[in-house]
């Protein structure tokens, strides 16, 4: 894995291919992110700023690009941590290009990012909120240790309550806090 570089067209092309794949639209929805600028704006908006780190800068951007094989292998996916809401812990996410899904790469890369975030950075609270119908992503979350964590209001789904998964020692959410793919601004 390598840190995402918003100025690297290969990184941007990979992420845009993931977000705009038929599978992503079917499982997550179409969030209208089509251009490198829209993608970079989204990353800047969702950058983690409120988590306390041990010996690391207080503002980091743990968006990682996943390569197949070694450091020069093809880009196949991304794993990330985002701060979408000031009232909720940051959330982890992952996405892979068509043809690389269902091969265990999401589990492997997400497990490594989670290890880095919890062990190296000391983060104690992380959410995951895959769509309930996205069985594969829910399975990945459970395999790497996330457990049912209550509900949040999904502003992208018209205020519908959706389940979240969280790390085991966290307090369950009661459905009174909201979240949006686009962050607190809710802007597209």
Image (cartoon, grey):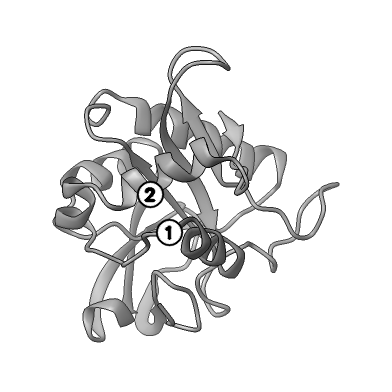
Image quadrant for the C terminus?
A: bottom left
Residue tagged 2: 16
> Any mark on residue 35, and which?
1
**Taking 163 as reference, is 93 left or right?**
right
**Taking 102 as reference, is 82 left or right?**
right
Which one is earlier in the sequence, the residue at label 1 or at label 2? 2
Pointers 1 and 2 in contact (C-beta within 8 Å): yes
Q: Residues within 10 Å of mark 2 (few under 14, many from 20)?
A: some
> Any mark on residue 133, and which?
none
* Viewer-nearest residue: 56 or 144: 56
Residue 83, compared with residue 15, is above or below; it is: below
Q: Which residue is painted at 33% across and 44% down in the image?
A: 17
* Viewer-nearest residue: 29 or 133: 29
Gap in Å between the C-alphas at discs 1 and 2? 8 Å
Q: Position of residue 74 (x, y in %)?
A: 44, 21
Q: Residues within 10 Å of mark 1 (few under 14, many from 20)?
A: few
Secondary structure beneath label 2: helix
Q: Which residue is painted at 79% across and 59% down in the image?
A: 58
Q: Picture quarter containing residue 128?
A: bottom left
Q: Position of residue 1 (x, y in %)?
A: 56, 28
Q: Position of residue 89 (x, y in %)?
A: 54, 67
Secondary structure beneath label 1: loop
Total numbered labels placed on residues in the image: 2
Q: Which residue is painted at 55% across and 16% down in the image?
A: 72
Q: Picture quarter containing residue 162?
A: bottom left
* Viewer-nearest residue: 59 or 144: 59
């Amino acid at each position: 894995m390598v840190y995402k570089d918003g100025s690297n067209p290969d990184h941007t092309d990979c992420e845009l291919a993931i977000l705009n794949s038929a599978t992503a639209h079917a499982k997550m929805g179409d969030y209208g992110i089509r251009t490198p600028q829209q993608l970079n704006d989204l990353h800047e908006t969702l950058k983690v700023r409120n988590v306390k780190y041990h010996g690391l800068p207080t503002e980091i951007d743990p968006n990682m690009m996943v390569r197949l094989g070694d450091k020069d292998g093809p880009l196949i996916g991304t794993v990330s941590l985002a701060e979408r809401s000031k009232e909720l812990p940051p959330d982890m996410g992952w996405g892979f290009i068509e043809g690389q899904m269902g091969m265990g790469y999401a589990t492997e890369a997400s497990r490594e990012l989670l290890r880095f975030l919890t062990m190296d950075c000391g983060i104690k609270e992380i959410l995951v909120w895959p769509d309930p119908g996205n069985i594969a992503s829910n399975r990945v979350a459970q395999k790497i240790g996330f457990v049912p964590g209550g509900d949040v209001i999904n502003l992208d789904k018209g205020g519908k309550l959706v389940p979240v998964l969280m790390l085991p020692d966290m307090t369950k959410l009661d459905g009174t806090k909201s979240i949006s793919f686009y962050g607190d601004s809710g802007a597209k």
